[in-house]
Amino acid sequence: MSNNTMTEELNNLRDFLISKNYKCWDTKYDEFPNVNMITQKLQRRLDIDFPDLPVCDCNDKLSINVNICHAVVHGNLSVTAEIHLCHANKQNEWCNLKIYSLKPKDVYGKLEHYETKLLKMWELFYDVL
């Protein structure tokens, strides 16, 4: 698979996430023997849209992150994504809630579902005594 196809796939998924109010804050390029990788990190701040949800006690924000990894290994393209939320609760206990190994079609079709699941898990963790 060509780098152009890889870049197009990356751009399409990134542009979809940007259309859902995510902001791309990092792009990393790695090359190894027989492996080319591009990793992009995006973040959506949710405390503005959901003011009733608890925020991280460390930074007073509530954000969901998406990492997209495009890898060409021996000419074969692999595209995966992970959606995660990493914050501290009021007891200063940290969690990293993660849904990973997602295919692009999962992100396109189920992004809102995954965001909702992570926010529900965050609410449960935040209220731990």
Image: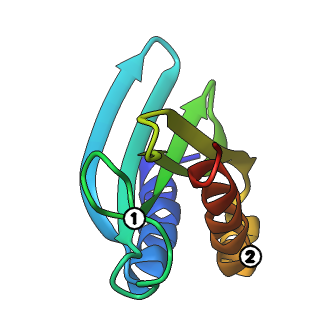
* Helix, strand or loop under label 1: loop
Q: Where does the C terminus fall, quadrant-wise?
A: top right
Image position of 55 (left or right of 66): left
Coordinates of residue 43 in the picture (x, y in percent): 37, 62
Front residue (pair 89, 16): 89
Q: Residue furthest top?
A: 33
Res 62 → quadrant: bottom left
Q: Is residue 103 above or below residue 76?
A: below
- At 31% from the left and 35% from the top, the residue drawn is 29
Q: Residues within 10 Å of mark 2 (few under 14, many from 20)?
A: few
Coordinates of residue 63 in the picture (x, y in percent): 40, 63
Coordinates of residue 112 in the picture (x, y in percent): 66, 80
* Amino acid type for the residue under numbered disc 2: His
Residue located beneath label 1 in the image: 62
Res 96 → quadrant: top right
Q: Residue furthest front?
A: 129
- At 73% from the left and 66% from the top, the residue drawn is 117
- Which of label 2 and label 1 is nearer to you? 1
- At 39% from the left and 63% from the top, the residue drawn is 55
Front residue (pair 38, 51): 51
Residue located beneath label 2 in the image: 113
Front residue (pair 4, 124): 124
Q: Is residue 41 above or below residue 52?
A: above
Q: Earlier in the sequence, mark 2 or mark 1?
A: 1
Coordinates of residue 64 in the picture (x, y in percent): 47, 61
